[in-house]
Image: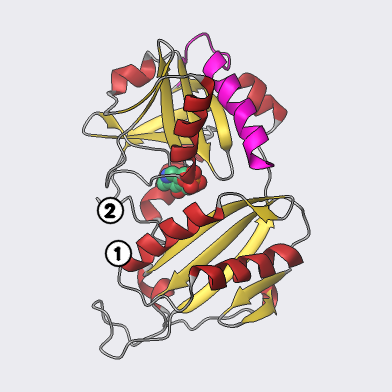
């Protein structure tokens, strides 16, 4: 497979960056993941807008316009083997002598893109729901930035993997934040509830999309703090992300969610999502 690195399409095995790259040394970079269906990026403008917000938030010099980034996405998408993909974009502050603060002499940002097959959730996951576990959210307080510094998310994901669960639902000060790499939703009395969009979560591109799908399906939607006990007593719990799309949760910490089966709100949103993603 080919990847894009700093100006050229390169075989993956030949793509190399400096060991002094601040991405490698400090996790000093921003990334983005765009789902691609039939080789067409899904909601690219929203993904690029979030990517640009992150780059600006950490003062990395963005060497490309939105149109140029989209051209680079298209390059990796066209050379990838499958029709449905997850395109990955990354920019780091670039290589520089190791000092924490931004280098006095601004380095050249490292630009990297690749695209991998999108493996959608299995039928079993969609029909039975997935198991989740919980833990305290111990990440930093700038979760709205899609930073490549993902150690907190890595540990949350591993916490799930170690318990044969699909995802870890994180709580901060007793309120639901998000998964290790997904947003989390609950359904109570027919209303879909999502945590507030603030610095404690990454605003998924599916966040706004799901609000739209609720509107289209006549499902009441509310964004507010969600207490831990509300998650455990919810009628339905859902996950969303570029790769997971929309997934039903069957159990949390071994306790059954609702009646243990994917519920009516999941089914409506899932069906609408399947239409939207190839529209
Ligand atoms: N929250 C975190 C921490 C994530 O890593 C992701 C990425 O998948 C999401 C939420 C969901 O965002 P999106 O819907 O843009 O994939």
The structure residue drawn at horizontal position 32% and vertical position 50%, both measured from the top left corner, is 143
Q: Position of residue 164 (x, y in %)?
A: 55, 33
> Does 59 sit left or right of 191 as displayed?
left
Secondary element under disc 2, as helix, strand or loop, is loop
Q: CA distance from mark 2 to mark 1?
A: 10 Å
Q: Is residue 234 above or below residue 75?
A: above
**Figure coloring:** secondary structure
Furthest residue in direction left, as rendered = 173
The answer to whether marks 2 and 1 mark residues whose Cβ atoms lie closer than 8 Å is yes
The structure residue drawn at horizontal position 48% and vertical position 37%, both measured from the top left corner, is 160
> Does 188 sit left or right of 111 as displayed?
left
Which sits in the foreground, 19 or 277?
Answer: 277
Residue at which label 1 appears:
57
The answer to whether residue 13 is seen in the rendering is yes
The structure residue drawn at horizontal position 55% and vertical position 69%, both measured from the top left corner, is 67
Q: Quadrant of residue 274?
A: top right
Q: Position of residue 45 (x, y in %)?
A: 51, 56
Q: Quick one: quadrant of the C terminus?
A: top right
Q: Of the numbered discs in the image, which one, if any, rests on residue 142?
A: 2
Of discs 2 and 1, which sits in the foreground? 1
Residue 71 counted in the magenta span: no
> Does 125 sit left or right of 94 as displayed?
right
Which range is magenta?
254-279
Q: Is residue 116 above or below residue 241?
A: below
């Amino acid at each position: 497979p080919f990847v894009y690195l700093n100006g050229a399409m390169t075989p993956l095995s030949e793509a190399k960056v400096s060991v002094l790259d601040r991405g490698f040394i400090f996790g000093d970079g921003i990334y983005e993941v765009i789902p691609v269906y039939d080789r067409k990026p899904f909601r690219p403008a929203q993904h690029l807008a979030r990517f640009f917000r992150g780059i600006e938030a950490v003062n990395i010099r963005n060497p490309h316009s939105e149109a140029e980034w989209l051209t680079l996405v298209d390059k990796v998408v066209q050379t990838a083997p499958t029709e449905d993909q997850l395109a990955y974009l990354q920019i780091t502050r670039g290589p520089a002598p190791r000092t924490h603060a931004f280098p006095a002499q601004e380095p050249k940002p490292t630009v990297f893109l690749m695209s991998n097959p999108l493996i959608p959730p299995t039928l079993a996951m969609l029909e039975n729901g997935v198991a989740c576990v919980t833990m305290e959210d111990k990440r930093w307080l700038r979760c709205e930035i899609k930073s490549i510094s993902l150690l907190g998310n890595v540990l949350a994901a591993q916490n799930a993997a170690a318990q044969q669960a699909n995802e870890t639902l994180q709580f901060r000060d007793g309120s639901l934040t998000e998964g290790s790499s997904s947003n989390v939703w609950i359904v109570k009395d027919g209303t879909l509830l999502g945590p507030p969009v603030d610095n404690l979560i990454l605003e998924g591109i599916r966040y706004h999309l799901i609000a739209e799908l609720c509107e289209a399906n006549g499902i009441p939607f509310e964004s507010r703090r969600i207490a831990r006990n509300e998650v455990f007593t919810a009628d339905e719990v859902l996950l969303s992300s570029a790769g997971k799309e929309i997934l039903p949760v069957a159990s949390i910490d071994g306790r059954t969610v609702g009646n243990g089966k994917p519920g009516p709100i999941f089914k409506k949103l899932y069906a609408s999502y399947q239409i939207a993603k190839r529209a």
